[in-house]
Image: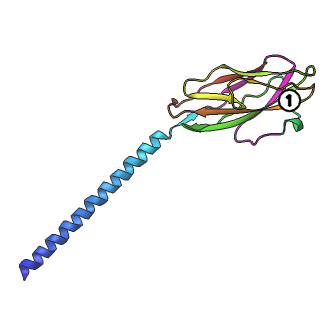
Amino acid sequence: MQNENDQDREVTRSRTSQKFKLYIALVLLFVATFASVAYALQSLTITNTETVILATKNWQGITFSPPNSSPVCATQTTYSDNPAPMTWGTIGQGASETGYICVKNQGGTGSTYIVTTTVAPPTGITVTYNGTSTLTSLPLNSGQTSLINVVVSAALTATPGAFSYTTTIS
């Protein structure tokens, strides 16, 4: 009888030991997965790095940094020959943020502008204006306004760190 009790205790200890090992293995798997996800979600900080240049004085602009919503350009009153830099927060790899530029025609009727990135960001970062790398506006009457959606995207392969770029409107 004592021999059977000893065997039962030994089987119970063996099961407890196996459960403990399984628990430890699951905890280690969770930690490894968490570390992998954290590494994959590195962020890029791009604070105060977009400069907007109005190459001709026929245009004035105003910038709206993320997370602002899309502005109504016609109701804005603080247009300038030298718009403020756009202030970007942190963009995760594989993500994007949207900012806005309102442009106002101060020149003649039927004027158009072209928007380009003249100082490009590093590989893995793309900047688009209304969905394209170079935007040509429709003709604007004197005093008429136009909205530019500026989207900065960070590829999964983008190198973390700060960078800068320049948007030119001519």
The quadrant in which residue 113 appears is top right
The quadrant in which residue 152 appears is top right
The residue under the point 23% across, 62% down is 18
Residue under circle 1?
79
Residue 132, percent from left and from top: 69, 28
In the displayed structure, would residue 146 be above or below residue 115?
A: below
The question of residue 137 being in magenta is answered with no
The residue under the point 59% across, 37% down is 91
Q: Is residue 136 left or right of residue 7?
A: right
Image quadrant holding the N terminus, namely bottom left
In the displayed structure, would residue 29 be above or below residue 61?
A: below
The question of residue 48 being in magenta is answered with yes
Q: Residues within 10 Å of mark 1 (few under 14, many from 20)?
A: some
- The mark tally for this picture is 1
The residue under the point 65% across, 23% down is 165
The residue under the point 88% across, 36% down is 74
The quadrant in which residue 65 appears is top right
Residue 5, percent from left and from top: 11, 79
Highlighted magenta segment, given as a residue range: 46-71
Residue 164, percent from left and from top: 63, 24
Extreme front residue here?
138
Q: Secondary structure at mark 1?
A: loop
